[in-house]
Image (spheres, rainbow, N blue to C red):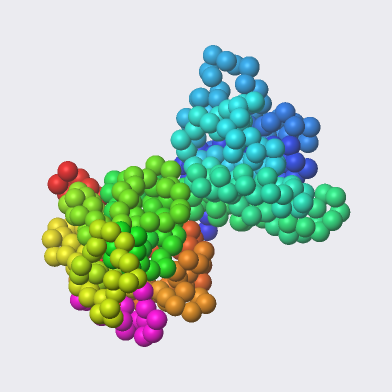
Amino acid sequence: MMDLRLRGTRVLLGVTGSISAYKAVHLLRTFMSHGADVSVVMTQAATQFVTPLTFEVLSKHAVATDLFTGHENMPHLSLPESADIIVLAPCTANTIASYALGLANDLLSTLLLTTQCPVVIAPAMDGDMWEHAAIKGHVQVLRERGVVVLEPEVGELASGKIGRGRLPEEKTILNAVVETIRSFNDLAGHRMLISAGPTREPLDAVRFLSNGSSGKMGYALARAAEARGAEVILVSGPTNLDVPFGVELIAVNTAEEMFQALLSRFDSSTVLMMTAAVGDFRPRYVLDQKFKKRQWNGEPLELEPTTDILSALSARRTEQVLVGFAAETNDLIANGKEKLQKKRLDMVIVNQVGGPDSAFGNDTNEVAILTKNGQVNQLPRLAKHVLADKILDEIHTFTASSTVTPHESLSQ
Ligand code: CTP
């Protein structure tokens, strides 16, 4: 059976000056054989390796190489406008750097600044270049902006040395393109309310009760949801993380502040994800000055419970999807199921806290996703940014298969 996973997709293939530029010829044919319409833009350096004519004949489109010819069509504006996805393959260290810095020194770099469509980068370079701190920094910047940067593969390089720098396999590039097209904007229309980080419950003017949550999972979810087209409001306790691009931040300290912030946005949201590690108790009495050592005569600290935010919001939900995060040290699945029922949630993500593999602070996490339909999806240990997309996939499937629809059905 023919595999037409790219049927109707307009791909703009950017070819840059790497020795592996010849592989882009076959990649172009593969994209086309999967149903894509492909146009090619080459950098001047790329034309040293393969002639534009080769791509022109195969793609049946003129190949653009120059910012200054055909200026009536403004190729740096018209080309990306007529593309669904831009694929840079092979992409050199130079193009990665210029894209990360926002330079506009040729047609390809300029159109990358004007495009709104997703971009997939398949790097190819010497292994030492890929490992260089400058390139690592640029790749991180691009990934944070939502660009899909594939890992080059390990193997023999043009220098004859073995290293990580080879253009990823064609199958890997194809799958990444299909996956990126599929997930691009699939959450458009959703208003996602995400809580993250710890809360701080003050004892006196300088002390507080808190926990070790870093906020990484909530921030990863906010970044991924925004990249997939959702409107995202992040209600966050204190963390040292950067607010993801395009995400609205409401910074809070206490559980009560978090509750009020979430409450004020809940009715107009489609999804609530409570990744925050909300303090369950707060000191009953808070001193507005520093409590002196000598003032303490041995009396225990009196605590009172905070609001269970998820339960309170679940009681006033209309059509929102409610996702809880259960932090457990033992009996993960059983405890997660109990929380799912008690708080009347649609989904619970159960993670292990405490011990060396604790979800708190780590860049990776191993979770199980429990749904109210009784499904248990145990995932392997994954980087939190990868996990974020998996969780969003589950939510997307859940919302698509239930009566919940994006925000037009909710009060504005
Ligand atoms: N949660 C909340 N408000 C609280 C405490 C927790 O909304 N005051 C939310 C968390 O954000 C999380 C879910 O409830 O999504 C489960 O949190 P967890 O700390 O695992 O459970 P608790 O409800 O605190 O129960 P327990 O202390 O028994 O584990």
Q: Is residue 341 visible?
A: yes
Residue 298 image point, x, y percent: 28, 81
- Report the front residue among 343 and 176: 343
Residue 79 image point, x, y percent: 53, 28
Residue for point 68% across, 54% down: 152
- Report the front residue among 322 and 196: 196
Residue 366 image point, x, y percent: 47, 73
Residue for point 38% across, 56% down: 238
Q: Is residue 179 left or right of residue 341?
A: right
Magenta highlight: main SS: helix
- Most extreme residue toward the top is 72
- Most extreme residue toward the front is 294
- Report the front residue among 85 and 263: 263
Q: Is residue 64 above or below residue 139?
A: above
The image quadrant that residue 280 belongs to is: bottom left
- Report the front residue among 194 and 255: 255
Q: From the image, which quarter does the C terminus lie in?
A: top left
Segment tinted magenta in the rendering: 327-343
